[in-house]
Image (spheres, grey):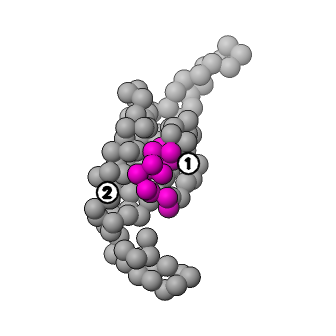
Amino acid sequence: MKRILAIIRPSKLDDVKDALESIGCHGITVKEVKGRGRQLGITESYRGTDYCVDLLPKTEIEIVVTDEDVEGIIKAISDTAQTGCIGDGKIFISPVEDVVRIRTGERGDKAI
């Protein structure tokens, strides 16, 4: 099992959600977060004064899937979240030791 953590633009959330549902991925967790990468923020002007916004709003999507589903989910997220501009985000993949469904006590792939 793998944990997929994707940081994307907030404006792309609905498109990514629809793409994931179309490939059969229904269980996701979504959080509103702030951060920065190579983009290092943006400079805006307000009433003639420039100021730097160095932590930009992003959306974090977390999904735990079987090893077989990882590549399809990465492709769905990448294809729909990509604008080609700096700040599109990143996808992190890490191993998951075990999963337990609290309601039934099921473990592993059955609990996903």
* Residue under label 2: 70
> Along the horizontal axis of the image, is 79 left or right of 61?
left
Q: Look at label 2 and name its amino acid.
A: Val
Q: Are marks 2 and 1 in contact (CB under 8 Å)?
A: no
Q: Quadrant of residue 4?
A: bottom left
- Tell me the residue at 37%/41% (across/down): 78
- Report the residue that reaches farthest toward the right: 47
Let me know if residue 76 is in the magenta part: no
- Mark 2 or mark 1, earlier in chain: 1
Query: Which portion, as a residue range, is magenta?
Result: 16-27
Give the secondary structure at mark 1: strand
**Image quadrant for the C terminus?**
bottom left
Spot occupied by residue 75 in the image (x, y as percentages of width and height) = 33, 45
- Tell me the residue at 52%/84% (across/down): 104
* Residue under label 1: 33
Residue 80's tag is none
Spot occupied by residue 50 in the image (x, y as percentages of width and height) = 61, 19
> Around disc 1, counting alpha carbons within 10 Å, would you say few (fewer than 14), some (14 to 19), or many (20 or more)?
some
